[in-house]
Image (spheres, rainbow, N blue to C red):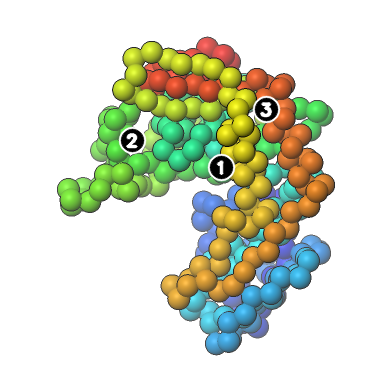
Amino acid sequence: MDGWSVSVNSTRNIFENIENLKKNRDFLNLEILPKCSLSPYTLSYSDDENISVIYQKKKAFISAPLRLIKDGEVLLYAIFPFIEAQRQNKGFFTMHGAAISLNGKGVLILGKEGSGKTTTVLRICKKNQALLLGNDLVIIGTKNNKTLITNGTKFFHLRYESIKRNLPELLHLFPKQNSNICSWIRKIILDPHDCGVRFSNEKIYLNTAFFVHVDETKKDLYVGSADTLPNRLYLNENCSRYIRGTCLSLLTEKGYLGYIPSFDSKTKFTKRKKVIDNLFRKYNIRFVSGPLEKVADYIISQN
């Protein structure tokens, strides 16, 4: 997965089940090989009515009926901590955000859920021919003392209410539904080409970074330093939740299968801290708030 590997052993032949999951958008560059890799990380699965989940350093043991693990999908989420551990050992990590290549320069766009990250990316990509590097999940780290964006998931979660306010020309992409359904929870998942957006899998060094908040109730644009305690706390949580397992769960229709421990360490924390500190000190990350057009135009002007 994205260059990192985990060996999966099973009491049943589930190769075809897992291979059918290669289109799952959450798993970057997923490859399934019908033989054990040389990875020191191993997951052993047993098709058993007795449910058990045990993680021991670089090994995991899961017992559960095959019907509960969604034909293998849960096993892929079970190995995600091992993938993230290997990634963070090399100074890279998964974060929730978006990244684009604008005029050949890497741009990182951050913000909490509903802040307008996706609509900002869509507007810039469609208006200025930027290339999507990642949306929802982005892989970043340090190389040659610079922040490098290496990959990211290539899909868009579009929220009806947000698109209605900011990009009404895309409303036709939503299927017709009962008007009584809350528009805020009405979402669809689309590939970039469905939205007229091009993407790139190239690795690119970061040029600028922004916290965004799209607010169509304001006429003017606000730009200020994003170096605040809440933003630093947010980035610390954002950059560590995959290695600590706080956003991963072995959830089935019957509930949780078991506990995923943290694989964090002081060494991994130090590497993440270096990237976060650089965002504020070296890249002078800014907070940008206002109407979508002005937010997008400002980011374009800085690159």
In this picture, is 213 found above or below 161?
A: above
* Earlier-in-chain disc, 3 versus 1: 1
Instruction: Tell me which numbered mark, 3 or 2, is placed earlier along the sequence.
Output: 2
Q: CA distance from mark 3 to mark 2?
A: 28 Å
Element on which disc 1 rests: strand
Q: Secondary structure at mark 2?
A: helix
Marks 1 and 2 sit apart, C-alpha to C-alpha, by 19 Å
Left or right: where 84 falls relative to 159: right
Disc 3 to disc 2: CB gap under 8 Å? no
Horizontal and vertical percent position of residue 155? 47, 43
The total of numbered circles placed on residues is 3
Q: Residues within 10 Å of mark 2 (few under 14, many from 20)?
A: some
Picture disc at residue 279? 3
Looking at the rendering, which quadrant does residue 90 occupy?
top right
Q: Callout 1, which amino acid?
A: His
Q: Residues within 10 Å of mark 3 (few under 14, many from 20)?
A: many
Q: Which mark is residue 296?
A: none
Q: Residue at x 26, y 44 (%)?
A: 183
In percent of width and height, residue 295 lies at 44, 20
Q: In this orientation, which residue lies closer to the viewer: 80 or 182?
A: 182
Horizontal and vertical percent position of residue 4: 73, 54
Q: Which mark is residue 96?
A: 1
Residue indicated by mark 2: 162
Q: Secondary structure at mark 3?
A: helix
Q: Residue at x 65, y 41 (%)?
A: 236
Q: Residue sitting at 49 percent across and 21 percent down?
A: 288
Left or right of residue 278: residue 241: left
Circle 3: residue type: Leu
From where the camera sits, is residue 136 visible? yes
Query: What separation in Å lies between label 3 and label 1 (alpha carbons)?
Result: 15 Å
